[in-house]
Image: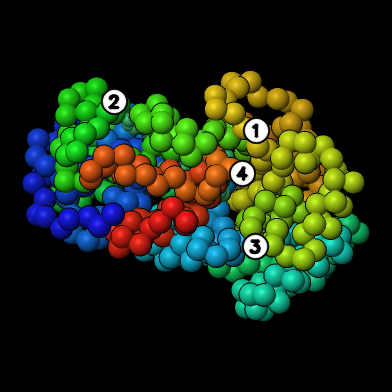
Amino acid sequence: MSIATTPSAAASSPASFADLPRGRSDLVVVGAGIIGLAHAFEAVRRGLGVTVVERDHRSVGASVRNFGHCCVTAQRGSQLELALRSRSGWLDAAARAGLWLSEAGALVVARSATELAVLEELREERGADAVRLRTRDEVAEALGRATDAREDLVGGALLPADLRVDPRRAAPRPADWLARQPGVHITWGTNVVGTEPGTVHTSRGPVHGERILLCVGHDLDRLHPREAEAHGVERCRLSMARVEAPGPLRTDAAVLSATSMLRYDAFTAMPSAGRLRAEVAAHSPELLNIVANVMFTRLPDGSLLAGDSHAYGVTETPFQDEATSRLLLREVARVLGVPEVRVTQRWQGVYASSTRGPLLLRDVAPGVRALSVTSGIGMTLSFGLAAATFEGTLTTQD
Ligand SMILES: Cc1cc2nc3c(=O)[nH]c(=O)nc-3n(C[C@H](O)[C@H](O)[C@H](O)COP(=O)(O)OP(=O)(O)OC[C@H]3O[C@@H](n4cnc5c(N)ncnc54)[C@H](O)[C@@H]3O)c2cc1C
């Protein structure tokens, strides 16, 4: 989609849910998660007028419930290209909106020779700058492990291109910044019930725009069920917890483990990945049963966001399984080398998922496009997707 650069009629106005814009924006974005907001950011960068319509009174979807990990290096092919573009977009957005962002990268911890072999193979493919192998002691130091608590470590790798943001601020802060820009209107607490070319129908009346972009994640099945079904959209439900700052942890990098290497394309494409899966299946089948990706990231106050498991269904179950949560926390404690971690919050995250491709991209009517990330890496891709959308280079192959 190339967005027409017609002058905006949308006047700058305070963000108020009761206050629909009267004019016609260049772009109406539905959904104030990171995908919608990244597109609004890109629209502003190009001098376009934009209206964002969000059903809730603040962002509370997948974009605030995740790890805040822009997982760049673990992507492959066109997704790696998008992730690298997105990286620049995040840096730019953070500078403009005053958003906390860490360039500490990601640390992948290897606790077996096979895990290390996957990392060495990735280093061979990407080069020693992109995948920096770490010794056992370097990994132990980063994790703050005592010298007598390193036995299970083999080594690891630092992926310096990865970024981290605080997910609890990463959507709200850009939304605040956008709301202060001329030509931008953010309409909270307003449910979109349908669209037609040039018009978004909401629970508070119509909103008009030259182009319309639906960034509603898994809830696309409420607005356009046929499009969602055609792409096999499901809800993926993840168990998450915030745990108290473990005293000695030294790294600000996102910390990934063997189960992370079973999830991301860059690792699964390595020759030793099959052997790694067999190894994890042999020593920790319970982690494969909950489709675990044992990892954690550190918030600015030192506490950790820890998770996660994956359960799939068109409608998610509302019940959180304590055994799953306990298992994940046990594994996080093992990576840290501490007896246990203390939980301060638990929640369930939900994102759009599909086995048919990482992106749902459909023109549902002339000038009305739906875009949902269906691979659980929307934070990583967001700003890259936005740039590609405006250039007209985004395809369903991405
Ligand atoms: C636990 C968890 C961990 C994750 N970790 C990572 C990670 O580390 N790195 C990464 O890259 N990705 C991660 N992800 C995935 C990432 O969070 C998502 O891909 C991304 O947030 C999707 O953004 P979004 O804007 O599409 O969705 P959302 O943030 O869910 O936003 C969609 C918005 O649309 C609004 N909406 C829906 N329907 C309507 C309607 N009819 N009218 C108006 N508004 C509507 C919703 O209220 C919502 O605010 C994780 C996800 C979860 C849940």
SS at mark 1 in the image? strand
| Location of residue 118 (image quadrant) | bottom right
Tag in front: 2 or 4 = 2
- Work out how far the residue at label 3 is from the one at label 1, CA to CA, in angstroms: 22 Å
Per the image, the residue denoted by label 4 is 305
Q: Is residue 194 left or right of residue 209?
A: right
Q: Is residue 382 above or below residue 161?
A: above
Residue denoted by label 3: 266
Quadrant occupied by the N terminus: bottom left
| Residue 93 seen in the figure | no
Q: Which residue is mark 2?
A: 193
- The residue tagged with tag 4: helix, strand or loop? strand
What's the distance in space between the residues labelled 1 and 4, CA to CA?
A: 19 Å
Residue type, label 3 = Ala
Three-letter code for the amino acid on which mark 2 is drawn = Val
Q: Residue furthest bottom?
A: 128
Q: Is mark 4 within 8 Å of ligand 1?
A: no
Q: Does residue 324 appear in the picture of this structure?
A: yes
Residue 311, numbered label:
1
Residue 84 image label: none
Q: Quadrant of residue 138?
A: bottom right
On whether ligand 1 comes within 8 Å of the CB at mark 2, the answer is yes
Type of amino acid at the residue the image marks with label 1: Ala
Q: Earlier in the sequence, mark 2 or mark 4?
A: 2
